[in-house]
Image (cartoon, rainbow, N blue to C red):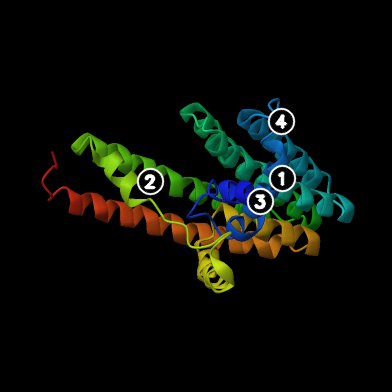
Amino acid sequence: MTDKLTRLWATKTKDDEWWSSFVTAPLAIVANYGAVELPWITPNRITAASFLVAVVATAGILIGGTGCFIAAAILIHVSHILDCMDGQMARYRQVSSLVGSYYDRLTDQVQVTLWFGAAGYAAYAQSLSVVPVFLALIGIAFYGLRGYVKYVAIQIETARDPDYPAMMARLGRVEPEAGLGFGLRANVAWFIKEQPKALIADEGVFIFMLSAALVLDQLILMLWIFAASQIFWGLYWAMKQGMNIDADRQLPIQK
């Protein structure tokens, strides 16, 4: 049992997002303990199930009401646990594929749009003000900008140096610092180290933030935080990527 859990923990994304890192990803490992032995459960089917659950959660937000909001909050977490499970299972079975990774990331982006778009509508229905809708649109747009500038930068850098993606992949490798076999002190230190990630306001933060807002019925406050954080990080990454491209053009191409 311990050996299997250790191997499953090794499939966890080493530099995972906040909340994903110490909540949904570990829960996915527990769920995968039995799921990886069932051949009819595949990573791609889990990806599809995650997206389907996300759509049902969106419907719950649109319907509104305390019961539907709480149900949606639970389903958002279920969707994200499944979202963690698919990659873990693929790595455990050694069947990772580029196509699977593509659809996993694509559905992640669509889910954020559905959830926060629905939250903007639900807040509008409560307040009869268009401000929440505007906040949701701004947040979604600048969240999309974060990913867009990253891939534009990769395209430009790769045109300059075809070895750039491989170099960045090597630099992005992170060794595990916690888990089974690391001891209590190492795991506590890792947990504390993970907390500043909450300020990055990415998908892992959204899972917690949106769910808490639904349970507490504080959608408008959450949307203000969502919009402000995405404006900041969207502009930050746009400027940072631009400065990196400008600096890298002075460097010789590595052969």
Q: Residues within 10 Å of mark 4 (few under 14, many from 20)?
A: few
Question: What's the CA distance linking mark 3 and mark 1?
Answer: 36 Å
Tell me the residue at 69%/44% (across/down): 33
Residue wearing tag 4: 38
- Mark 3 or 1, closer to the camera: 1
Q: Residues within 10 Å of mark 3 (few under 14, many from 20)?
A: many
Front-most of residues 52 and 143: 52
Which of the marked residues, 1 or 4, is nearer the chain's N terminus?
1
Q: Check disc 4 and give the amino acid type.
A: Leu
Q: Which mark is residue 150?
A: 2
Q: Which mark is residue 133?
A: 3
Query: How many numbered marks have been drawn onto this rendered protein structure?
Result: 4
Q: Quadrant of residue 233?
A: bottom left
Residue 77 location, x and y as percent?
72, 50
Q: Check disc 2 and give the amino acid type.
A: Lys
Task: Classify the position of the C terminus by image quarter.
Answer: top left
Visible residue check, residue 115: no
Q: Residues within 10 Å of mark 2 (few under 14, many from 20)?
A: some
Residue wearing tag 1: 31
Residue 168 location, x and y as percent?
31, 46
Which of the marked residues, 3 or 1, is nearer the chain's N terminus?
1
Question: What's the CA distance linking mark 1 and mark 4?
Answer: 12 Å
Q: Quadrant of residue 225?
A: bottom right
Question: What's the CA distance linking mark 4 and mark 2?
Answer: 37 Å
Q: Check disc 1 and give the amino acid type.
A: Ala
Report helix, strand or loop for mark 2: helix
